[in-house]
Each structure stands twice: as structure tokens, then as C-alpha cells.
Image (cartoon, rainbow, N blue to C red):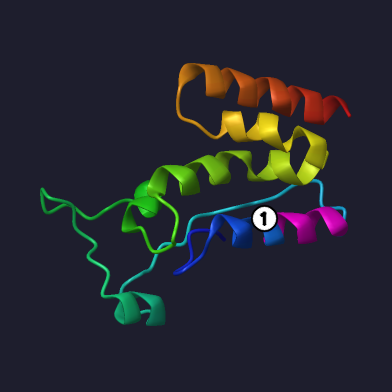
Amino acid sequence: MIGLPGETRENVFETIKINKMLGITATNVYIIYPYPNTQINEEYNVNFYDNNGHIIPISNASSFALSKMIPSEVEGLLKTFELYVRLPEKMWSIIKIAEKSDKTAEELKNVLYLYANDN
């Protein structure tokens, strides 16, 4: 789980490094969603409604901005977390490019997943 209150990019990479050390080859990563009446929800007084009065869906959990990272950074780490775990550290600067939310980044992410599956 990423996007926890107060979490930094460095904290996420601590988790990635633990996964690498354990030899994990597949991950399930989610952005925390502070459900009503949970301790995190109550402690951080989370508003579950967007500007139109609709409940924010789980797919937009990064918008709660509980971590010290901006929502787009949390989203980028979500979509590349497994790549960081599976590929060598010397490729991390390339993976970071794939964190972005543009067409080039998406294509790069797909190529990196193909590479990871072949190795």
C-alpha cells in the first residue's frame, strides 16, 4: 500500500528494496483509501466528496493527498512499482521516466514490462 499519511518517495523505495531483497516477482500495490469511520479517516478528517458532491472513487485515491508526495507522483509509483521491484537498480532512472502520464511514458512502461517478463 502506498500513499500513506506522511509517506515520502524514499519510504516507497524502502518497501521496493525489501521486496527486491525477498525476491518478490509479482506485486499487488494499491493507494490507500481512507474509508469512513477508520482511524486514518478520522485522524485526517478526509472529505470523500468532489466539488460536484460525488463520492471520490477508489481509482482516484491519490487525490486525498495524504502522503508527502503529489498525487501524480503516487500514481506514477503505483504503475511502476513492480518494475522497480523486478528490474535491476541500474534501470531505475529509465523506470522513473515511465512514471509520467503521457503517451511516451506509457509506451516505455509497456516495453519495460515486456523486458521484465523476458528476463
- Residue at position x 27%, y 69% in the image: 46
Q: Is residue 70 left or right of residue 1?
A: left
Q: In the rendered image of this protein, does residue 26 appear above or below residue 5?
A: above
- Residue at position x 57%, y 61% in the image: 1
- Residue at position x 87%, y 53% in the image: 23
- Residue at position x 31%, y 73% in the image: 36
Q: Nearer the viewer, residue 115 or 12?
A: 12
- Whether residue 101 is in magenta: the answer is no
Q: Element at badge 1? A: helix
Q: Nearer the viewer, residue 85 or 35?
A: 85
Q: In the rendered image of this protein, does residue 32 appear above or below residue 91?
A: below
| Residue 96 point in image, percent of width and height | 61, 35
| Residue 79 point in image, percent of width and height | 57, 39
- Whether residue 17 is in magenta: the answer is yes
The amino acid type found where label 1 is placed reads Phe
| Residue 118 point in image, percent of width and height | 86, 25
The span shown in magenta is 15-21
| Residue 114 point in image, percent of width and height | 75, 23
